[in-house]
Image (spheres, rainbow, N blue to C red):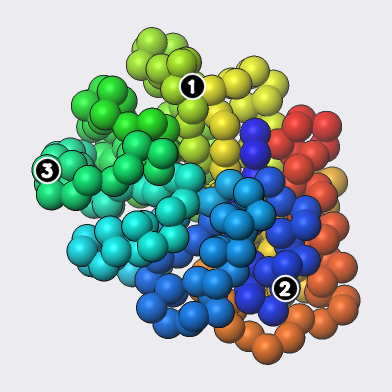
Amino acid sequence: MKVFHEAPLCIFDYVQQVTDGDYALVHLFEQSDQYFQKFQDSIAKGREVILDNSIFELGEAFDHDRYYHWIMRLQPQWYIIPDVLEDCQGTINSMDNWFSKYSVPSHIKSIGVVQGKQYKEIKECYKSINNRVDKVAISFDYSYFIKPDSKNKYKDYMSGRQSLIDQLYFDHVINFKKPHHLLGCSLPQEFKHYQRNQYSFIDTVDTSNPVVAGLNGVVYNIDGLETKNPTKLVDYMFIDVVTGSNLMKIGYNIGRFKEFCKCTG
């Protein structure tokens, strides 16, 4: 499982040294030339880059015409097709519209996100997009994961995605010949589950979790975390400096995160 961690620009190069690839948020390209340049440099170095449509940050996918512009300009290895949060049919329609309107070169591979309000819809969405994309992505925070009597929504998100992937597996929905991407995470210990079950179809994961924790002075314990800071990484993207103490915490957290992904933690 290859790990991609988003990080503030001021420590981008440091975090890049300890990650497997780089994860870009397209809307930030229009806010910062320096941000875009970082990913151009990544491409030039031969690093794997995933370009995201920024739906998590914006609430809806970035403007399609502008997104296509940036895909063609950056030429990343991967891009996430515009989707609609928790809307199976809306996501399918968005994919239909995307493929009918835009022609992305075949060397830039597509990622389709499964969406839905319940398992049945997510399963339907998976089956619909599976043969149309190069990689399937599964998010960490579908709202139906949260239990009615929830005492810790972050644990609900963690167990919810674990159960979702297990169910897709046991229902023979998972396409084992296709790589999968896990979008974000709530708690880092989630990923031990996939390694223990030998879910080799999970190819990549992106998350700012160990970075945001470290920025807030939080160090992973031996079991991971009990909760998480709700602040999104994008809110830290253009800070001027990270203290040496917090940088050490970030480095430690990233190391522990990798151990969870390898099931050695």
| Picture quadrant where residue 212 is located | bottom right
**Identity, as a three-letter code, of the amino acid under mark 2:** Ile
Q: Position of residue 221 (x, y in %)?
A: 82, 52
Q: In this figure, which residue is indicated by the disc labeled 2?
A: 11
| Residue 78 left/right relative to 236 | left
Q: Position of residue 81 (x, y in %)?
A: 30, 47
Q: Which one is earlier in the sequence, the residue at label 3 or at label 1?
A: 3
Residue in view at x 76 percent, y 81 percent:
242
Q: Position of residue 86 (x, y in %)?
A: 27, 47
Residue in view at x 38 percent, y 62 percent:
73
**Identity, as a three-letter code, of the amino acid under mark 1:** Asp
**Nearest to the observer: residue 259 or residue 3:** 3
Residue 100: mark: 3
Q: Which one is earlier in the sequence, the residue at label 3 or at label 2?
A: 2
Residue 197: mark: none
Residue in view at x 82 percent, y 61 percent:
251
Q: Which one is earlier in the sequence, the residue at label 2 or at label 1?
A: 2
| Picture quadrant where residue 125 is located | top left
Does the rendering let one see residue 227? Answer: no
Q: Quadrant of the N terminus?
A: top right
**Identity, as a three-letter code, of the amino acid under mark 3:** Ser
- Name the element at disc 2: helix
Q: In this figure, which residue is indicated by the disc labeled 1?
A: 166
- Name the element at disc 1: helix
